[in-house]
Amino acid sequence: MRKISLLDHNSVPKHEIIQVDDIKSLLEKYQIEKGQLPKLKESDPVAKELEAAVGDIVKITRISQTADESLYYRLVIE
Amino acid sequence: MAISEATIESMIKDLELPNNILKTLRDDALKVGVSKKEMEAIIERVMESYKYACVEPCEAVGVVSAQSIGEPGTQMTMRTFHYAGVAEINVTLGLPRLIEIVDARKSPSTPMMTVALDEGYSTDRDKAKNVAWDIEATHIEHLADVTTDLANMQLIIDLNGKILYQRNMNIDDIADKLRDGLGVKISSPDAVENQLIITPDAPSYRELLQLAKNIHAVTLKGIEGVKRVVIRKDGDEYTLYTEGSALKDVLLIEGVDATRTYTNNIVETYEVFGIEAARNSIIKEAVDTLNEQGLTVDIRHLMLVADIMTCDGEVKQIGRHGISGEKASVFARAAFEVTVNHLLDAGMRGDVDELNGVTENIIVGQPIKLGTGDVRLISKRSGRAGLT
């Protein structure tokens, strides 16, 4: 059985769980509540690989055709 | 006097601009050689243009996207099938494919994979071929002649030795697979080479004929659901194109490059690689479908569609069972599809419509909260005593 890291795949952008301290400044920057962020399911294959728990915020560094690199955040939900 | 790279870097590093604009700005400024005063003027002009190009607050971007995709959509072909340039594999194109993408179908009408090969496999045609045989589903009709012997109540399978050798299979494997798949007794006579004889459990004609039919459904080698594999040389490496899609199984096969293998099935991409990969897949498929028809739609519109479809962590379709069906407002849902049902259900439940959205306000004839309609004038009353 081969072991494959999903994050190595071309179409999976870089995902990382952000620190609890950074959450506040993030929410302040966009002036939103946590629940207003886009969601990432706990059962999502990438969330499983990161071992993200419900309530974590995952920072996604997308390779964008229009802006080279763009940041996106998702809240992990059940 | 031209300023140094470090100075330019420090001048532009805090600007709120996307990376690619910053890079162009830096490279061009270095190439031409600008003075500090010129650089300041350039930055000011760039920021001005960038702000001008940004979407304004309260702009109805969704409507603009819908129009921008819809108008070229009217020029697309209605014909479902085409042979695309890639390896004579039939793929759905044009409008039917675009509809399939935004509807987030469980499986597209023509699933297809592009399987990249690992180093060592990708340049060697024989190795690539072996991987292809590991992927393509092999059934008994590819390998043998099956005859029904009614006199002796048995199925006689005459295997083609040459094909077996080509596909790297042997008679024992096939016997095992058939035994597991059908649950019957299988014997191979010593007198004839490459022959298998199957006898049904109960000696009845029905059983025998049923067996003769079922034997074709057993997958002897490869992945079930992959009907055909075509090897093609792209540049200096071999790539496999498959008809039928089974991403999860393909990734586990030795020699397959799991980082570059791609399927056109968006829901399957979501299940294997997660929501972000699914978003990328939606954008890629939509852009490819439109470009193939010679239409250019700004990618930002398609990115918006993909973002909305994936923002809840799962792939949702644009339509009654997805985005439009989940709107909070009863009127907005009723205005889209199945009007009577929505109104009736809402009436029975006693739903309240807050009239916050655009659609419901148009229905009742009020100004909508968009553009200038979203701005309220507030007068400052400070400075005049007695009025506060």
Image (spheres, coloured by chain):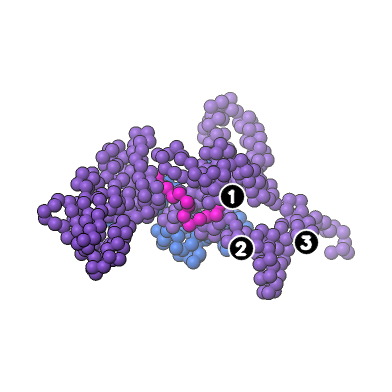
Are discs 1 and 3 less than 8 Å apart at CB?
no
Identify the disc placed on residue B364: 3
Residue found 38% across the figure and 46% down from its top: B242
Residue B343 in magenta stretch: no
The kind of secondary structure the magenta stretch mainly shows is loop
Three-letter residue code for mark 2:
Glu
Q: Nearer the viewer, residue A50 or B291?
A: B291
Q: Colour of chain A?
A: blue
Three-letter residue code for mark 3:
Val
Residue B53 in the image: above or below residue B29:
below
Identify the disc placed on residue B326: 2
Determine whether, in the image, residue B83 is placed left or right of residue A29: left
Three-letter residue code for mark 1:
Leu
Residue B66 in the image: above or below residue A76:
above
Residue found 52% across the figure and 47% down from its top: B97
Quarter holding residue B53: top right
